[in-house]
Amino acid sequence: MEHRLISAIETALGWNGAEGLGKDFVRGSMDDPELVSRIMTPNRLLDIAMRRSLNRPQFRCFQKGEEVHPAIYYTDSVSPRGQSIPMVNMRSLGRLLGEGATVIMDQANVFDPTMEVACRALQWWSHERVQVNAYLTTNDAAGFPLHWDDHDVVIVQLAGEKEWEVRSTSRAVPMYRDADPNTTPSDQIIWSGVMRTGDVMHIPRGHWHQATRTGRGSGKSLHVTFGITKRTGASYLAWLADWCREQEIFRHDLDRWSGTGGEALTAAAAELVSQRSPADYLAAYEQETTLPRQVPFLDIFGPLEAMVCTTRFRPRIEENGETVEVTASGKKLTLAAKALPALRLLLSGRPIQLQQAAAVVGAEVTEVAEILVEEELCAVMTPELSSGYTGLVTNAVS
């Protein structure tokens, strides 16, 4: 899947692929104002909040360095039948933003098609899970105090400006679940300055950082943070622990009294490691992830006319003589070899108009598409989902 945002990030950071993730702090700028506003705007973020029932921590507000109590900017919307649904009180939120505040929308990719598609493209690109949080700050409001994240982040400044400070790590590659709380910030400042519209920054896991508009007066800042959680050696060992249950020796109780059996257990563990490598784990991780949420296809609503592959990671397609196998999201499908051209097109991650696709790979593309949609590897292209691709990902047969 070729996404304009990924190309722009690579160019801004001087990358060619995702190999730079998690290595060094780097920043740059995207010279594409239209792309920046296409990703998200302050008004679109507020429109998302207005139209959905969001609760903390999905949507939070901070003022003067403290979290604002939800009761101040939430109101229960009561239906004529007395049903109560918590909704953001936009008038109250507007007052807070006018005074100077920061609002945060966690996992904006769940609520906005453009963010959803951007995260999916970044997942296919990085081979890791990605989520995006959006941060809107007004006037001279402060941001979060100095902190570190347990994942790598790519930050894109979409509107206005914000002052940042980035420091080195005080513990190498710290983790969320770790042997050390890692609460003492580093004194080494790597970079401090202002992020302006179109700027991009990569902060590796564990680097201390903070951002603020304090002292900058009237104005705004909107940035999105793509959180990219990479696999670790600890992840690999946890995966091996699940595999060990297949062998009887690992299912036996540990004998604390006689002390026997330790050598056999150690040897079995070493054999398990030799049988399943870290590369095996990484490949399995991509193909065993769960299916994403999507609108189901029901033929009572009309025929399937357009669709797109929505798996969290790129499906694996393997030729096997007279058949071809597709592995993705914990599923393995076996189709006739003649379906290969259709599969390559339909699983490209790019939007597909089936009538156009039939002219390229043959009429059987519709039948293959129906199978992929039924198995939920692909989704029907609704107007809302289509909006997440428009102008960002090219149609597969355009």
Image (tube, rainbow, N blue to C red):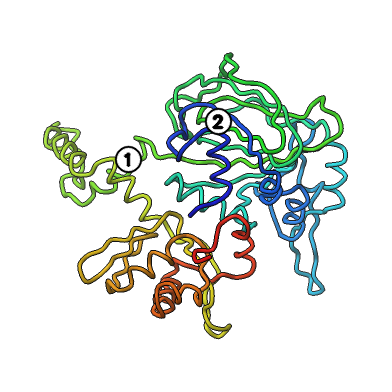
Q: Is residue 164 left or right of residue 204?
A: right
Task: Please state the horizontal and vertical placement of residue 239, each as a whole percent of the image.
Answer: 31, 45
Q: For residue 259, which quarter of the picture?
A: top left
Residue 37, above or below 146: below
Report helix, strand or loop for mark 1.
Answer: helix
Residue 324, above or below 146: below
Q: Which mark is residue 267?
A: none
Figure disc tally: 2
In the displayed orientation, state which residue is furthest to the bottom. Answer: 300
Residue shown at 58%/83% (left/top)? 301
In this rendering, which labeled residue sits more in front, label 1 or label 2?
2
Task: Please state the horizontal and vertical placement of residue 23, each as a whole percent of the image.
Answer: 46, 29
Residue receiving disc 2: 203
Residue receiving disc 1: 236
Task: Please state the horizontal and vertical placement of residue 53, each as a whole percent of the image.
Answer: 71, 59
Residue closer to the observer: 397 or 384? 397
Residue closer to the observer: 280 or 177? 280
Kindly indicate whether the residue at mark 2 contacts the one at mark 1 (C-beta within 8 angstroms). no
Q: Is residue 151 left or right of residue 90?
A: left
Residue shown at 85%/47% (left/top)? 94
Identify the mark nearer the N-term, 1 or 2.
2
Residue closer to the observer: 287 or 30? 30
Q: Residues within 10 Å of mark 2 (few under 14, many from 20)?
A: many
Q: Residues within 10 Å of mark 1 (few under 14, many from 20)?
A: some
Residue shown at 23%/49% (left/top)? 245
Q: Please, what is the three-letter code of the amino acid marked with disc 1?
A: Tyr
Q: Please, what is the three-letter code of the amino acid marked with disc 2?
A: Ile
Q: CA distance from mark 1 to mark 2?
A: 24 Å
Q: For residue 269, which quarter of the picture?
A: top left
Task: Please state the horizontal and vertical placement of residue 129, each as a whole percent of the image.
Answer: 47, 47
